[in-house]
Image (cartoon, helix red, strand yellow):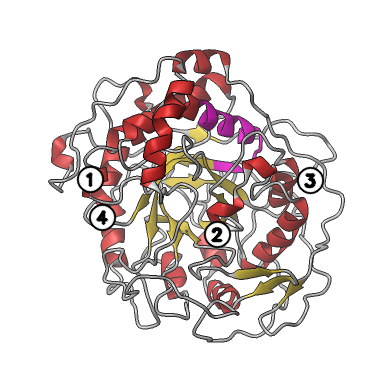
């Protein structure tokens, strides 16, 4: 299956967009050069899930000054892809999308949010799957479909996280994917890839992947099948971890037969601290880059659980130890060789959906998907309302106006986004700026405080991740259980 993120017409005054990519088989690739594309990414949710405030007309891509500062810092890191978890589809994202575009960065957009009625829940998923929910997810796609640097959408994040959720939610994950793809096919000129971001709960990691990538017999155009597969993996922990002890070798071996691109939609175990980012070198090295399409570091901003690269205070943004350690480690990769790799550009047959694909007794082994809510066909045929269609806009000044300090407290002067031309994407080392000395402090947080929960030992089963929360993971089931039935009735 070929999916092209085609370039839309934009005003002549707008900086050139990053080059549209294609997906074929298990690779992203540049259709002009035939080279593979590796995601060098970061999760972006300033303020955490609490930073998503629709009532205040605020989400991560509404503050152009903040986006300029963060895009400039991400350029220095070598970031080419930014994952945004919580989006209000009715707000104006044009300036931020245009800034990241000019900086050579693609956007990965989650269509869900942490608020009731705005995501499929891990418990009683049938209560969260209703017309109002789909209306909003379709509106998210509408808001970003015209940005040529929108790389892909995630239809869900870590919905399957234990035995009870594995036993009820899989058909709903594929149903939402089906509905999103049907809406895109009817309403958009370009078909942006849609996939699922999975928790690396090793009992279910491969079952979830096979469930999402397999082909249902008789399903027209494989509309419920995911186009990509993301894995939130935290099994490489500490300076002594290796490709083998972290089980990265097992992940690489298992996913080498994937029929869709596989990448780390989150990575970066933070126990024990500090993080040395040796897994980044492995991820883009010869052992893994033929199977994985890169990954996204968790996360850009410092939140409660100390995964941040940058800390925001009332005085400005301050780089944390993880920033320079990651920056310096990424420069150890031979990016000229990585970027020069040719894609095979071959379709890979996906497995047929069959209960034999499922290895864990607690994982639901059928593909009887729920039908769409009653008003779904009308939304698909007529388009949703209200909606906002984003577009790239001219950015005349790329200087950073907000204060930024290195880890030692020295202000970074004359910081700016380098606006790329000729369809360029960013990569580590492309933009070089002095960001202070690398340290090995034992905490990413300049203020100390409570570290992430979890044993942090990286047992090779994804258990090295702390207790982190993001916009597509629900932490309040009792509240949602009470709210969802009422919401469903409103939109019935």
Q: Is residue 83 left or right of residue 220?
A: right
Q: Label 2 to label 1, Cα distance in Å? A: 30 Å
| Quarter in which the N terminus is drawn | top left
Q: Is residue 178 left or right of residue 350?
A: right
The residue closer to the viewer here, 276 or 126, is 126
Q: Which residues are magenta?
A: 135-151
Residue 401 figure quarter: bottom right
The residue closer to the viewer here, 345 or 267, is 267
Tag 4's secondary structure? helix
Which comes sooner in the sequence, label 4 or label 2? 2
Q: Label 4 to label 2, Cα distance in Å? A: 24 Å
- Rendered image: mark on residue 86: none
**Residue 248: percent from left, percent from top:** 32, 66
Label 3–label 1 contact, CB within 8 A: no
- Rendered image: mark on residue 15: 3
**Residue 71: percent from left, percent from top:** 69, 58
**Residue 2: percent from left, percent from top:** 46, 33
Tag 2's secondary structure? strand
What residue is pinned by disc 2? 42
Tag 1's secondary structure? helix
Which comes sooner in the sequence, label 3 or label 2? 3
Q: Label 3 to label 2, Cα distance in Å? A: 23 Å
Residue drawn at the location 40% of the way across and 79% of the way down: 272
Label 1–label 4 contact, CB within 8 A: no
- Magenta includes 331? no
Dot 1 alpha-carbon crowd within 10 angstroms: few under 14, some 14 to 19, many 20 or more: some
Mark whose residue sits in front, 2 or 1:
1
- Rendered image: mark on residue 254: 4
Q: Label 4 to label 3, Cα distance in Å? A: 41 Å
Which comes sooner in the sequence, label 4 or label 3? 3
Residue 319 figure quarter: bottom right
What residue is pinned by disc 1? 164
């Amino acid at each position: 299956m070929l999916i092209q993120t085609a370039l839309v017409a934009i005003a002549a005054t707008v900086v050139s967009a990053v080059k549209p990519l294609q997906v074929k088989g298990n690779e992203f690739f540049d259709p002009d050069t035939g080279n593979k594309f590796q995601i060098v990414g970061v999760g972006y949710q300033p303020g955490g899930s609490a930073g998503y405030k629709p009532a205040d007309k605020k989400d991560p891509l509404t503050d152009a000054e903040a986006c300029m500062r963060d895009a400039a810092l991400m350029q220095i890191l070598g970031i080419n892809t930014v994952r945004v978890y919580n989006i209000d589809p009715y707000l104006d994202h044009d300036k931020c999308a245009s800034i990241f575009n000019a900086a050579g960065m693609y956007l990965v957009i989650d269509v869900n949010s942490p608020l009731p009625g705005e995501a499929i829940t891990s418990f009683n998923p049938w209560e969260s799957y209703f017309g109002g929910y789909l209306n909003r997810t379709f509106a998210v796609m509408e808001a970003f479909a015209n940005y040529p640097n929108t790389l892909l959408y995630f239809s869900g994040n870590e919905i399957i996280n234990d035995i009870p959720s594995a036993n009820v939610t899989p058909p709903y994950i594929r149903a939402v994917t089906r509905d999103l793809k049907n809406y895109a096919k009817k309403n958009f000129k370009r078909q942006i890839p849609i996939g699922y971001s999975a928790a690396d709960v090793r009992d279910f990691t491969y079952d979830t992947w096979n469930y999402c990538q397999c082909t249902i017999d008789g399903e027209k155009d494989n509309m419920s099948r995911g186009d990509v597969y993301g894995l939130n993996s935290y099994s490489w922990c500490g300076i002594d971890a290796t490709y083998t002890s972290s089980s990265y070798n097992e992940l690489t071996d298992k996913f080498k037969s994937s029929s869709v691109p596989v990448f780390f939609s989150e990575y970066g175990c933070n126990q024990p601290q500090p993080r040395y980012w040796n897994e980044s070198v492995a991820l883009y090295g010869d052992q893994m880059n033929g199977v994985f399409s890169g990954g996204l570091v968790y996360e850009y901003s410092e939140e409660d659980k100390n995964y941040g690269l940058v800390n925001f205070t009332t005085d400005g943004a301050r780089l944390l130890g993880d920033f320079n350690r990651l920056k310096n480690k990424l420069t150890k990769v031979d990016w000229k060789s990585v970027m020069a790799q040719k894609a095979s550009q071959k379709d890979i047959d996906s497995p047929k959906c069959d209960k034999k694909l499922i290895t864990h007794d607690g994982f639901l082994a059928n593909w009887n998907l729920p039908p769409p809510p009653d008003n779904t066909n009308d939304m698909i045929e007529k388009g949703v309302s209200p909606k906002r269609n984003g577009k790239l806009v001219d950015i005349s000044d790329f200087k950073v106006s907000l204060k930024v300090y290195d880890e030692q407290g020295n202000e970074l002067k004359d910081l700016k986004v380098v606006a790329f031309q000729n369809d360029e994407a960013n990569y580590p080392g492309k933009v070089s700026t002095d960001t202070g000395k690398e340290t090995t402090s034992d905490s990413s947080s300049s203020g100390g405080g409570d570290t992430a929960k979890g044993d942090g030992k990286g047992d090779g089963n994804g258990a090295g991740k702390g207790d982190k929360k993001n916009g597509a993971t629900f932490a309040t089931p009792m509240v949602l259980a009470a709210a969802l039935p009422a919401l469903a009735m409103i939109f019935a």
